[in-house]
Image (tube, rainbow, N blue to C red):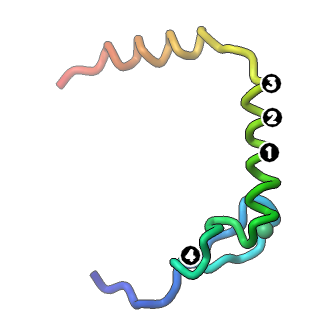
Protein backbone atom coordinates (compact mmCIF):
# COMPACT_ATOMS: atom_id res chain seq x y z
CA UNK A 1 0.00 0.00 0.00
CA UNK A 2 1.52 3.29 -1.07
CA UNK A 3 -1.35 5.43 0.09
CA UNK A 4 -0.60 8.31 2.38
CA UNK A 5 -2.42 8.96 5.62
CA UNK A 6 -4.15 11.94 4.07
CA UNK A 7 -7.88 12.10 4.41
CA UNK A 8 -9.87 10.84 1.54
CA UNK A 9 -12.24 13.40 0.17
CA UNK A 10 -15.65 12.66 -1.21
CA UNK A 11 -18.36 14.83 -2.65
CA UNK A 12 -21.39 15.45 -0.53
CA UNK A 13 -24.18 13.74 -2.51
CA UNK A 14 -26.53 16.48 -1.45
CA UNK A 15 -24.70 19.75 -2.07
CA UNK A 16 -21.53 18.59 -3.91
CA UNK A 17 -19.31 20.03 -1.25
CA UNK A 18 -15.94 18.38 -0.73
CA UNK A 19 -16.06 16.36 2.47
CA UNK A 20 -13.26 14.65 4.36
CA UNK A 21 -13.96 10.96 4.74
CA UNK A 22 -12.77 10.24 8.26
CA UNK A 23 -14.06 9.31 11.65
CA UNK A 24 -14.30 12.97 12.59
CA UNK A 25 -17.21 13.30 10.23
CA UNK A 26 -20.08 11.12 11.42
CA UNK A 27 -22.24 12.41 8.58
CA UNK A 28 -19.99 11.18 5.80
CA UNK A 29 -20.36 11.06 2.90
CA UNK A 30 -22.45 14.12 3.62
CA UNK A 31 -20.91 17.40 4.76
CA UNK A 32 -23.40 17.98 7.52
CA UNK A 33 -26.35 16.49 9.29
CA UNK A 34 -28.78 18.71 7.41
CA UNK A 35 -27.47 17.44 4.08
CA UNK A 36 -27.68 13.91 5.34
CA UNK A 37 -31.27 14.31 6.43
CA UNK A 38 -32.25 16.12 3.27
CA UNK A 39 -30.79 13.44 1.06
CA UNK A 40 -32.34 10.67 3.10
CA UNK A 41 -35.77 12.26 2.82
CA UNK A 42 -35.39 12.55 -0.95
CA UNK A 43 -34.15 9.00 -1.18
CA UNK A 44 -37.06 7.71 0.87
CA UNK A 45 -39.57 9.62 -1.22
CA UNK A 46 -38.02 8.30 -4.40
CA UNK A 47 -38.18 4.74 -3.19
CA UNK A 48 -41.78 5.08 -2.13
CA UNK A 49 -42.81 6.57 -5.45
CA UNK A 50 -40.95 4.03 -7.59
CA UNK A 51 -43.28 1.60 -9.28
CA UNK A 52 -42.34 -2.05 -9.19
CA UNK A 53 -40.27 -3.24 -12.12
CA UNK A 54 -40.68 -7.03 -12.35
CA UNK A 55 -39.37 -7.01 -15.93
CA UNK A 56 -35.99 -5.87 -14.76
CA UNK A 57 -35.87 -8.41 -11.96
CA UNK A 58 -36.69 -11.18 -14.39
CA UNK A 59 -33.99 -10.09 -16.80
CA UNK A 60 -31.49 -9.87 -13.99
CA UNK A 61 -32.20 -13.35 -12.67
CA UNK A 62 -32.13 -14.90 -16.13
CA UNK A 63 -28.75 -13.28 -16.75
CA UNK A 64 -27.50 -14.81 -13.55
CA UNK A 65 -28.82 -18.19 -14.61
CA UNK A 66 -26.86 -18.08 -17.84
CA UNK A 67 -23.52 -17.62 -16.17
CA UNK A 68 -21.21 -20.60 -16.38
CA UNK A 69 -18.37 -21.23 -14.03
ZN1 LIG B 1 -23.64 18.90 1.85
Q: Quadrant of ligand 1?
A: bottom right
Residue at left 57%, top 82%? 24
Residue at 42% of width from left, 15% of height from top?
61
Secondary structure of residue under mark 3: helix
In the image, which is nearer the foreground, mark 4 or mark 1?
A: 1
- In the rendered view of the protein, which quadrant contains the N terminus? bottom left
Q: Earlier in the sequence, mark 4 or mark 3?
A: 4
Image-quadrant location for residue 48:
top right
* Residue 59 placement, left or right of 47: left
Q: Disc 3 designates what residue?
A: 49
Q: Which circle marks residue 45 in the picture?
A: 2
The disc placed on residue 41 is: 1
Label 4 – label 3 distance at C-alpha = 31 Å
Could you tell whether 21 is left or right of 32 in the image?
A: left
What is the C-alpha distance between the residues marked 4 and 1?
22 Å
Q: Distance between the Cα atoms at labels 2 and 4?
A: 26 Å
Q: Where 39 falls versus 31 (above or below)?
A: above
- Residue that mark 4 sits on: 21
Amino acid sequence: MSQTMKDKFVQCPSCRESVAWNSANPNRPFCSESCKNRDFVEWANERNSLPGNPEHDELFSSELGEQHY
